[in-house]
Image (tube, grey):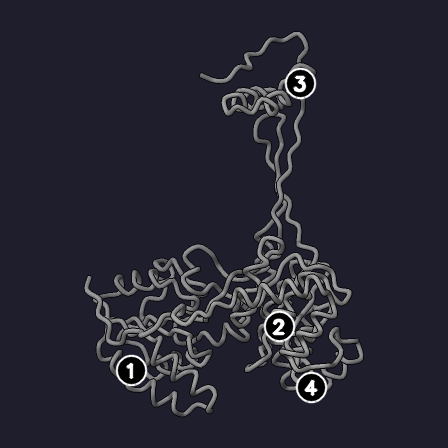
Amino acid sequence: MARSYLKKAALTARSDAADVSQTVRRILDDIEAGGDEAALAYAAKFDGYDGAVVMSEAEIEAACAQVPERLKADIRFAHDNVRRFAEMQKTTMQDVEVEIVPGLIAGQKVIPVEAAGCYVPGGRYSHIASAIMTVTTASVAGCAHITACSPPRPGVGVAPAIVYAARICGAHRILAMGGVQGIAAMTFGLFGLPKANILVGPGNQFVAEAKRILFGRVGIDMVAGPTDSLILADSSADREIVAADLVGQAEHGYNSPVWLVTDSRDLAETVMARVPELIAQLPDLNRQSAEAAWRDYAEVILCDDHEDMAATSDEYAPEHLHVQAGDLDWWLDRLTCYGSLFLGEETTVAFGDKASGTNHVLPTSRAATYTGGLSVHKYMKIVTWQRATREGSRDVALATARISRLEGMEGHARTADIRLAKYFPGETFDLSAAE
């Protein structure tokens, strides 16, 4: 198989990774030591906001009243789709039990985490969809307390549409605070909030680093890098649609890779010529991001055939993977590494980003080789239990005693010995280490 790069990335998503860890650690330490006051000081510095941090019911209602009815209907539509998909996912997790051997019963129990902290970006873009994706799944999972946290804008507060989405999707509290200070507030339980058991949602490099540092004392959805997307297109694909889809994902940010993998040189060359033209038609801020992403991070790879295209895609393990090629069922069966898969031109990554029902919080930077994205499952703990009759414990105790002694763990062995002696008095057992 011969692959050729018609366009090769000058940079990778990690090329300009700033060392923000020290800064983030200092902020987290300051806020953990200083509590509410320290968090408010950082909020004043970074958010430029001096309004209420935990929004009151009256403030929430006032914000919701500012949202146009058409937008409210669109948010409800997206919420319903995400909710229905999450409810389906939840049915795949069940409490079960099985008799392992006669008299020994073991099982699993599915328990939602108590408190979820959902971060919703609100800086350059107001990520209404992120509120829908994170809060809805936490609500369907059954989390007892859900905090939605989003950066406020000076003199405005949290974007009204984000407030409306968080409210109808099930948030119990809405926190007007951004960045590391918002993550810290949810983790440490500031401003009267319960301490979060899990933090979810996208954010900038400071938010991502804060979640990475805090992982362990609190759960997280994933450590996220810049968003990335890959299109698999053969000669049957609509070249204009392929180009538009690449541009649509490039506008995420200056370091958001987009990749085109194809077995058609004609398609590749046509798309490469068209993409800059479409980027030039974007609004200024979007155009600047897309130009940089296309110039520095995009790649166009020419492959021999569909199998080579699929193998290339699996190596890249993209966050978003869009197939615009024939025989969609073949691709569905063949592809193995992606965050979310979009089959055919009739769907697109933007549908999944905003309203179709699957979640848009997905693994980046090749993390799709080992994990999927955010789902109702992320908020659920699968715990195990067991019970036994005395007869059912007999063989387990014998095996436990012998294995423990072979390992040198005499205390473990004696917890089995004492039960055998109590339950089966007068019997003799060989409890020595196995040879």
The amino acid on which the numbered mark 1 sits, given as a three-letter code, is: Met
- Quarter location, residue 420: top right
Q: From the viewer's perspective, is the residue at label 2 or at label 4 nearer?
A: 4
Task: Tell me if mark 4 has few (under 14), some (14-19) or many (20+) residues whose alpha carbon lies within 10 angstroms of its own.
Answer: few
Lower sequence index among marks 4 and 1: 4
The three-letter amino acid code for the residue at tag 2 is: Ala
Helix, strand or loop for disc 4: loop
Lower position in the chain sequence, tag 3 or tag 4: 4
Numbered disc 1: secondary structure: helix
Residues 312 and 18: in front is 18
- Looking at the image, tell me whether mark 2 or mark 1 is earlier in sequence order: 2
Question: Does residue 11 appear in this view?
Answer: yes
Earlier along the polypeptide chain: callout 2 or callout 4?
Answer: 2
Task: Rate crowding at label 3 as few (under 14), some (14 to 19) or many (20 or more) other CA atoms within 10 Å.
Answer: few
Q: Position of residue 44 (x, y in %)?
A: 68, 79
Query: Is 233 left or right of 13, judged from the image as shown?
Result: left
Q: Residue furthest left?
A: 2
Q: Which residue is mark 4?
A: 156
| Circle 4 or circle 1, nearest the eye | 4
Q: CA distance from mark 4 to mark 1?
A: 41 Å
On the image, the x and y values in percent for residue 273 come to 28, 86
Q: Quadrant of residue 291?
A: bottom left
Residue at image x 44%, y 81%?
251
| Separation of marks 2 and 1 at Cα, in angstroms | 35 Å
Position of the N terminus by quadrant: bottom left
Q: Is residue 136 visible?
A: no
Left/right of residue 242 with respect to residue 387 in the rendered view: left
Mark carried by residue 131: 2
The circle on residue 418 is 3
SS at circle 2:
helix
Q: Are marks 2 and 4 in contact (CB under 8 Å)?
A: no
Along the viewing direction, whichever of 207 and 320 lies nearer the viewer: 207
